[in-house]
Image (cartoon, coloured by chain):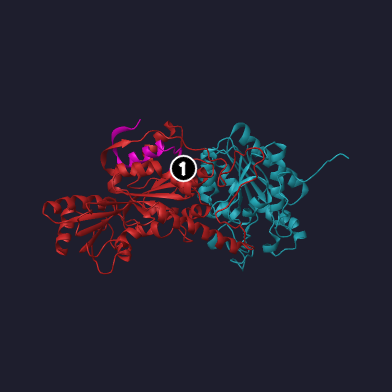
Amino acid sequence: MECIYTKSKALSAVPTSFCPGCMHGTAIKLIAEVSEELGIENDLVVVAPIGCAVFMGAFVEFDSFGSPHGRPGATGTGFKRSNPDVPLILYQGDGDCASIGLAETMHAANRGENFTVVMINNQVYGMTGGQAAPTTLPGQKTTTSPAGRAIEGTGYPIRLAELIAELKAPKYVTRQSLHTPKNVLAAKKAIKKALEIQINEGGYSFVELMSACPTNWKIDPKDAPKYMEDVVLKEFPVGDLKG
Amino acid sequence: MSEKVVKKGNEAICEAAIRAGCRFFSGYPITPQTTATEYLSWRMPEAGGVFVQAESEVSAINMVAGSAMAGTRAMTATSGPGLSLMTETLSVMAGTRLPAVIVNIQRAGAGIGAITGNQSDFYMVTKTLGHGGLTGLVYGPESIQESIDIMYESWDLAEKYRTPVIIMTDGVMGQMMEQVEMPDYKEAPDLSDQPYVAGKRKDGRKKHLIMDSPYFGPMPTQNDNLEYNYAEYEKVYESWEENEVRYEEYMMEDAEYLIVAWGTSARVAKTAIRHLREQGIKVGLFRPITLVPFPKKQLQAIDKNKIKGILTVEMSVPSQFHNEVVHYIDKDIKVEKYRRGGGNMVLDEEIEECVKKML
């Protein structure tokens, strides 16, 4: 019988430990599949820093290393500059990438480092139990904004992809979503394009992936995609911003 | 071939790093370190390595960690405030057991303090690297030549023990010029199979999952493995006490009085000792070269029947090194201290006065 779909060789035998409705598993699967399609499944290295992103290392067959919270932009720079031929993905959450690591993220982008950032944006700090993030929506209730995120005093959600797209050096900046099969396919294409740029011509690429955290949103996992479509994507529109 | 050159301390220690096979430097300008970063901005690319001026010391040390995980001999240089910013990643590097070299060109005091030389980061680097109680090898050279020699060896030691190595110079040593002998170029080893190195996978090699906390091991739970593995780390630290302690005994053979000092303070003390000897006063110097491991046994062995008094000399107020030394000295030996702080130098004539008061 012809095999038309199977689990990527780049995924390990360990079942993922993510919560129901979480889209980290989807993002990791896409990275694994793209690595195989590009023939780099034995070469790709991923940085899995603090946050739920840290679990990635256990679920893939790639070499991976951790990073202090927010610092992948720097650890990735040191690694890639010393290993320019090794394809590299920085797999970061929105708290890691857009809050504690904003300086490292922006400066790595501004230098045009030759790696790909995949940022999972689920609008909360997932691992610590759903605190407000820089990406939390106005009015969104979290454990540190129990009355809902107030614009006065906490500001507006940071649209990191738009900020990075303003810089001259980055080659490809996009925001995609993981809430429908159609969006998942588009996200996969974006990851592939980013890695192709990194491998073939060299340059910085940033792929923001909108994701759900039903556990901390206090939403039924089956309702999360509709909430994302109706509410989240209004604040974070999908599409290519550069390149 | 080694060569004789006249070089500024900061430039000399960086040149020694290049010759030791270092091919990655990241740093952020801070007085009195800046001449090191300036030197490597052109010298490192010339030697075929990578120089990155980081956006902060936080980034600089993380770039070094990233480069070390690529199997490269990597380093940074900084001074007190920058070292404070680096401490989280120093803790991570000690946890990952990542070899790399950090030069701390000490300035004075807490906070901004003063930009002149001092020895006030002693506790900060010798007690623990950041949070968690882990440590690394720490050296306190007294001269530009000694800092070159230690730097030249530092990655060999860092890789042997899988540890960060910290070299503690200061603003005085960094800025002054001396004639020195620069060693020959050395080839860095291929580290690509090391468990802390990612990428460049040879066929069939299993993945490297590099984490700063050793969760895996023979024990049933993560906590138990952390405890077990940290106990293994401790055995490495204990082996340093046996095998890596370095010190100098200067004019100690017939000494009735001893000065105990490290780094620049020890060098000034040697001048004082020569003057005192000319006056017939039998005084010598015990100088720790490794600050971690600290020469505890050697200090404990100082004989109360031979030594009538000890003077510690350091450039730090409040005292730090003094308190550490006193801890190991026989309680029957009187230990006095002479120290200058705030970025002031210790002076040989003041050391002489202090020794004479003890007679």
Q: Between residues A81 and A126, which one lies in front from this camera angle?
A: A81
User: Would you say residue A177 is visible in this rendering?
Assistant: no
The chain ID associated with circle 1 is B
- The amino acid pointed to by label 1 is Ala
Rendering coords of residue A149 (x, y %): 60, 63
Chain A tint as drawn? cyan
Residue B101 included in the magenta stretch of the image: no
Instruction: Identify the residue at horizontal 21%, vertical 63% (top origin).
Output: B309
Q: Between residues B21 and A77, which one lies in front from this camera angle?
A: B21
Tag 1 residue: B74
Rendering coords of residue B34 (x, y %): 35, 43
Q: Is residue B322 left or right of residue A165?
A: left
Rendering coords of residue A6 (x, y %): 79, 44
Q: Quadrant of residue A46?
A: top right
Query: Given the current orientation, which residue lies at the most extreme left position?
Result: B279
User: Would you say residue B236 is visible in this rendering?
Assistant: yes
Q: Give the quarter of the figure containing the C terminus of chain B.
A: bottom left
Q: Is residue A3 left or right of residue A13?
A: right
Kindly state the secondary structure of the residue where label 1 is placed: strand
Magenta range is B1-26
Query: According to the colouring, which chain is red?
Result: B
